[in-house]
Amino acid sequence: MIYFQEDCFKEESLIEICTFPQIQINKLFLEMAKQKKKVFFIDTIGNIDLLIKHQNRNKEYECFRIFSISDFYDVCSILQSETGFYLFIDSITFVIEWNKYSIKPGEENHPKKIYNKLWDLIYSNNATIIVTNHYRPKLENGNKVYVPRLGNCFFR
């Protein structure tokens, strides 16, 4: 079990948990959420929504199921009226991948725009945001290594 501790996860920050795609991070999210009072989820896959409905009837969570990048921005607008909350996003990989196909010539780099929106929630609303990113296999010098799928986004 992972606990929010000063030496583990800093509150009012953006925390990225990088995992292999087959790992069920949603169960970890729910364990972490049990420790907090004001919790929201953005679910791009449907797993969290199902777990909440079937396993956590004793605590009510708000889960936003999103299907597009505009849904993501709508949820961020809704959350601007909240303060001191925890937001779990499974998975930021899918949010950004949806968006990369809608980039128009001359538009700002969308992954940065998405992360700027998340940082705005952190600074303006005292939010703690936990996102998942997934590893992908990559061949490097003849060896198979795993790198974050959104690695280029983070290392520019």
Image (cartoon, rainbow, N blue to C red):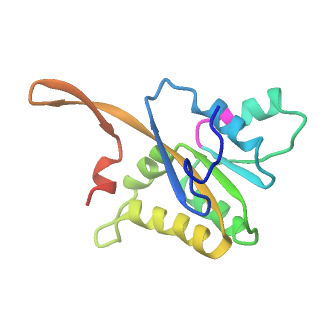
Q: Residue furthest front?
A: 7
Q: Residue at x 53, y 43 (%)?
A: 91
Q: What x and y, as percent, mark residue 9? A: 56, 51
Q: Residue at x 76, y 68 (%)?
A: 82
Left-right relation of 67 to 19: right
Total labels drawn? 0
Q: What x and y, as percent, mark residue 122? A: 59, 67
- Please state which of residues 89 and 66 is positioned toward the viewer in this rendering: 89
Q: Main secondary structure of the magenta part?
A: loop
Question: Is any atom of residue 71 visible in this view?
Answer: no
Q: Quadrant of residue 71?
A: bottom right
Please say whether residue 25 is one of the residues in the magenta stretch: no
Left-right relation of 101 to 137: right
Q: What x and y, as percent, mark residue 87? A: 65, 54
Q: Is residue 114 above or below residue 90?
A: below
Left-right relation of 151 to 80: left
- Please state which of residues 67 and 125 is positioned toward the viewer in this rendering: 125
Question: Is any atom of residue 7 visible in this view?
Answer: yes
Left-right relation of 42 to 113: right
Q: Is residue 74 above or below residue 152?
A: below
Q: Residue at x 58, y 32 (%)?
A: 25
Q: Residue furthest left?
A: 141
Q: What x and y, as percent, mark residue 134? A: 42, 37
From which residue to which does the magenta span run? Answer: 44-48
The quarter in which the N terminus is drawn is top right
The quarter in which the C terminus is drawn is bottom left
